[in-house]
Amino acid sequence: MSQEDLLKKMSNVPEPTLRRLPWYLSNAKLLKQRGERYVSSTQISKEINIDSSQIAKDLSYVHISGRTRVGYEIDQLIDVLEDFLGFTKIHKAFLFGVGNLGGALLQDSGLSQFGLEIVAAFDINPLLVGTRMNGIPIYSTDEFEQRLAECQVQIGVLTVPIEIAQQITDRMVQGGLRAIWNFTPFRIRVPEEIVVQNTSLYAHLALMFNRLTAYNQSE
Ligand code: NAD
């Protein structure tokens, strides 16, 4: 599927559905590992605790139809979801800031299963520059523009200290990167055409604490 077709398809899909589709994919892979050939929305529903009619509705966006009583063929479901979510295409990325978080992302080989390949990282720490982590080369931030000219990269992963988040963002945009996966708590400013995805591991903590308190109080 071309990038344009993919964008057209995905832009019609509600965001909550897009967030749930990767769960269905992981679940289908797990069931495949267990030797299953078919899966129904009721089965997925039991595994991940989402209403089965919601699952069937979500899956209708990816144009896969299940067979009455047996459900979806797992191999086909995996292929269709991976293709739809853009995970079959590898998106190359540069990472800025190889500290605790950046280092952990470099170590995470699982990212490539979701279509993201970090091909190089940049830092200013002389102890890191010139080394490799999980096989990924770490260069001086000064080398960014030169390295970008050598490979087709569109995505920047931002894991630098908050104080320099905007400065590094500006440099990434100036260099020609088109999307930024921002892990810093700073609300970076970018031109309209640049895609920004803010991600926080802490975002749901308050929700968890809140539910836990409610649960403890109800006992
Ligand atoms: P860290 O101090 O361990 O790492 C920061 C790294 O950035 C260091 O290696 C440092 O040398 C490097 N750096 C400094 N200036 C740079 C430059 N000009 N170019 C490239 N690299 C440079 O910090 P950390 O704990 O890994 O956190 C990094 C960022 O991620 C912070 O902004 C933090 O708030 C954020 N963070 C977010 C989450 C989340 O859930 N989104 C979780 C943890 C940390």
Image (tube, helix red, strand yellow):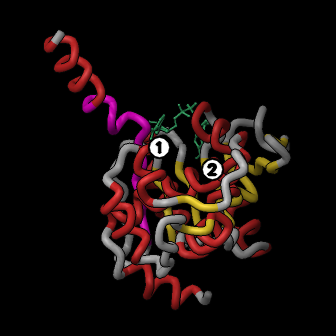
Placement of the C terminus among the 4 image quadrants: top left
What percent of the width, then of the height, locates residue 55?
38, 61
In magenta segment, residue 198: yes
Q: Position of residue 179 (x, y in %)?
A: 50, 68
Which residue is rendered at x = 67% and y = 42% of the image? 124
Query: Is 124 contained in the magenta span?
Result: no
Q: Measure how far apart labels 2 and 1 are at the Cα level.
A: 10 Å
In this figure, which residue is indicated by the disc labeled 2? 31
Q: What stretch is highlighted in magenta?
A: 195-207
Q: Position of residue 163 (x, y in %)?
A: 42, 41
Query: Is 153 on the left-hand or right-hand side of 139?
Result: left
Whether residue 30 sits left or right of residue 120 in the image: it is left
Quarter of the view holding residue 80: bottom right
Residue 41 drawn above or below residue 57: above
Query: Where residue 176 is drawn, which disc sits there?
Result: none
Q: What element carries label 1?
A: helix
Q: In this view, does 193 lie to the left or right of 215?
A: right
Residue contact between numbered discs 2 and 1, judged by CB atoms under 8 Å: yes
The picture places residue 108, in percent across and down from the top left corner, at: 69, 42
Dot 2 or dot 1: first in sequence order is 2
The answer to whether 49 is drawn above or below residue 179 in the figure is above
Task: Specify the amino acid type for callout 1.
Answer: Glu
Residue at coordinates 41% horizontally, 42% vertically from top-left? 200
Q: Name the residue under label 1.
A: 47
Quick one: label 2, few (<14), some, or many (20+) residues within 10 Å? some
Residue at 37% from the left image edge and 44% from the top image edge: 49
Name which residue type carries label 2: Leu
Position of residue 110 relative to residue 83, above or below, is above
